[in-house]
Amino acid sequence: GAGVSQSPRYKVAKRGQDVALRCDPISGHVSLFWYQQALGQGPEFLTYFQNEAQLDKSGLPSDRFFAERPEGSVSTLKIQRTQQEDSAVYLCASSPEGGNTGELFFGEGSRLTVL
Amino acid sequence: QKEVEQNSGPLSVPEGAIASLNCTYSDRVSQSFFWYRQYSGKSPELIMSIYSNGDKEDGRFTAQLNKASQYVSLLIRDSQPSDSATYLCAVTGNTPLVFGKGTRLSVIA
């Protein structure tokens, strides 16, 4: 596709439910990043993939958060046993560059609301 | 821990004026600096990057970097109502991109 595609755009979950958020990056982009953006805040780094390798997961807030990119393209962010504090917009970004590049292309985000 | 500080605003400027947005960062090993624009309800979009001390101009936008002072700024000349958005300063070096909280800019027609 022409841009980074994320689904679902909106997700409402009851506390304790598991959710899965999907990201389809720009074709050929090596790097894929997940960020979490709470209302009124800047994006907070969660995790980074270069191809299929998860090179940095230091931003994942707890072991309830898990991300994968098994074939080096589509990525899924999974949140188990959701809590109210998980409510945020989850942004996926990709880049043709490897490493700690700052030139990211963002998807429209998945807005998660946990009741 | 790397921190990026921005005044949250809102910064209000009249149409046609110069908007000045400022950012400071804490990590001296930071190497690359970026400004992203985020419209309400939309995702961030890269508008400027700067890698060395001095000024970099692109159309109505000028980014300024002073590594000694750990200071980055963005000037928007001839501000338009369509420039009204949140501007995010972001920094990288040895770690993935770190964002500030953003400054909300409002350009009044």
Image: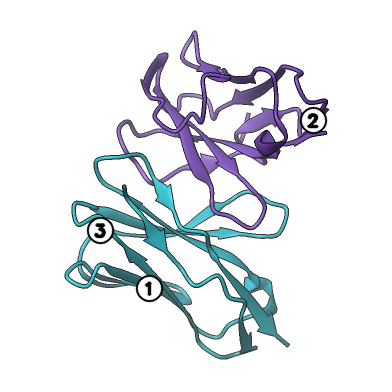
Chain colours: A purple, B cyan
In the image, residue A13 above or below residue B64: above
Q: Which dot, 1 or 2, sits closer to the camera?
A: 2
Residue B39 in view (yes/no): yes
- The span from disc 1 to disc 3 (Cα, nearest Å) is 13 Å
Residue pictured at 54% horizontal, 30% vertical? A26
Q: Amino acid at mark 3?
A: Tyr
Name the quadrant containing residue A8: top right
Q: Nearer the viewer, residue B4 or A51?
A: B4
Q: Amino acid at mark 2?
A: Lys
Q: Chain of mark 3?
A: B
Of helix, strand and loop, which one carries label 3? loop
Residue pictured at 49% horizontal, 9% vertical? A71
Rate crowding at label 2 as few (under 14), some (14 to 19) or many (20 or more) other CA atoms within 10 Å: some
Name the quadrant containing residue B14: bottom right
Pinpoint residue B49: horizontal percent, then vertical percent.
36, 58
Q: Nearer the viewer, residue B77 or B20?
A: B20
Q: Which dot, 1 or 3, sits closer to the camera?
A: 1
